[in-house]
Amino acid sequence: MKTPQIPLKAYTPPHDALDAVSRFHEIVSQRRTVRQFSDRAVPREVIERVILAAGTAPSGAHKQPWRFIAVSNSEIKHRIRMAAEEVERDFYANKASERWLKDLEVFETTPDKAYMDSVPWLVIVMALRTTDDGGQVYYLNESVGIATGLLLTAAHHAGLATLTHTPSPMNFLREVLGRPEHERPYMVIPMGYPAEDCTVPDLQRKALDEIAVFIE
Ligand code: IYR
């Protein structure tokens, strides 16, 4: 059966294109990865919408090969923290190269992930290695990467701070969360308001001529 075609409802911004994209850039340029979170509550409805926004991502053959596990349960957050810290202790003590540790100095990261207890939500992104009924998926990393980018952007748009955390290995998540084999843990994303005294490293973003090449 052929999928029916419908007319595209094209999105027209309320401002001209340059004005619209400039406003958007202004908003997203304020996003920073945060490692100090407030315990201020975030309603579940907000997280639901953020996830719905992530779920608008394009995906290979529209298989939508992602699942977002949103955890506010203190006991489960704590179990994730404990397991993640164990993995990170091994990373800092044994796995990371000298160069890697040097590159991380500016972020002052350590195996201590105390914010995983205080942050109101941990959103764990799962990449589906097959569809839920065992079917093929395509361009899995690209698809889930785009969805995760939208998740971070939607959270930022709602005033929420995020952190992209990839403890490695992170198989423990499937067990702690009771998730099936075909869900591959992709990223752990603490999501909440930044702490009032939150600081971030003074980093600069690359200029346009460093990230873009125009061939006209
Ligand atoms: N996963 C570790 C180390 C770490 C690695 C990178 I690359 C970062 O950009 C930040 C941290 C941790 O979370 O501490």
Image (cartoon, helix red, strand yellow):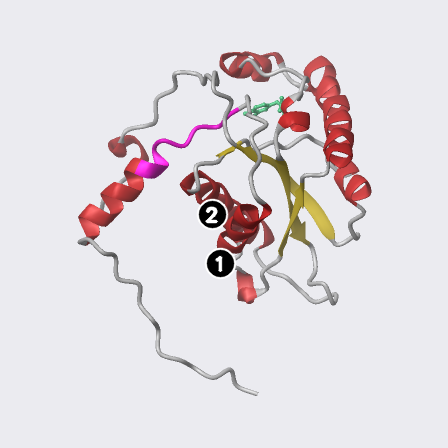
User: Is 29 above or below relative to 134?
Assistant: above
Is label 2 in contact with label 1 (beta carbons under 8 Å)? yes
On the question of residue 190 being in view, the answer is: yes
Residue at position x 72%, y 38% in the image: 73
Q: Amino acid at mark 1?
A: Thr
Q: Quadrant of residue 190?
A: top right
Task: Looking at the picture, tell me which residue is in the foreground, 57 or 104.
Answer: 57
Ligand 1 is found in which quarter of the picture?
A: top right
Measured as percent of width and height from the top left, residue 149 is found at: 48, 44
10 Å neighbourhood of mark 1: few (<14), some, or many (≥20)? few
Residue 30 colored magenta? yes
Residue 38 lies left or right of residue 134; in this view the side is left
Badge 2 or badge 1: first in the primary sequence: 1
Query: Can you identify the residue that label 1 sits on?
Result: 56
* Measured Cα–Cα span from mark 2 to mark 1: 8 Å
Residue at position x 26%, y 62% in the image: 12
Task: Looking at the picture, tell me which residue is in the foreground, 141 or 203.
Answer: 203
User: Disc 1 on helix, strand or loop?
Assistant: loop
User: Is 3 above or below relative to 18?
Assistant: below
Measured as percent of width and height from the top left, residue 198 is found at: 48, 18
Residue 187 colored magenta? no
On the question of residue 216 being in view, the answer is: no
Q: Amino acid at mark 2?
A: Leu
Magenta residue span? 27-34
Measured as percent of width and height from the top left, residue 98 is found at: 61, 12
Query: Can you identify the residue that label 2 sits on?
Result: 150
User: Is 31 above or below relative to 195?
Assistant: below
10 Å neighbourhood of mark 2: few (<14), some, or many (≥20)? many
Name the magenta segment's main secondary structure: loop
Residue 173 lies left or right of residue 190; in this view the side is right
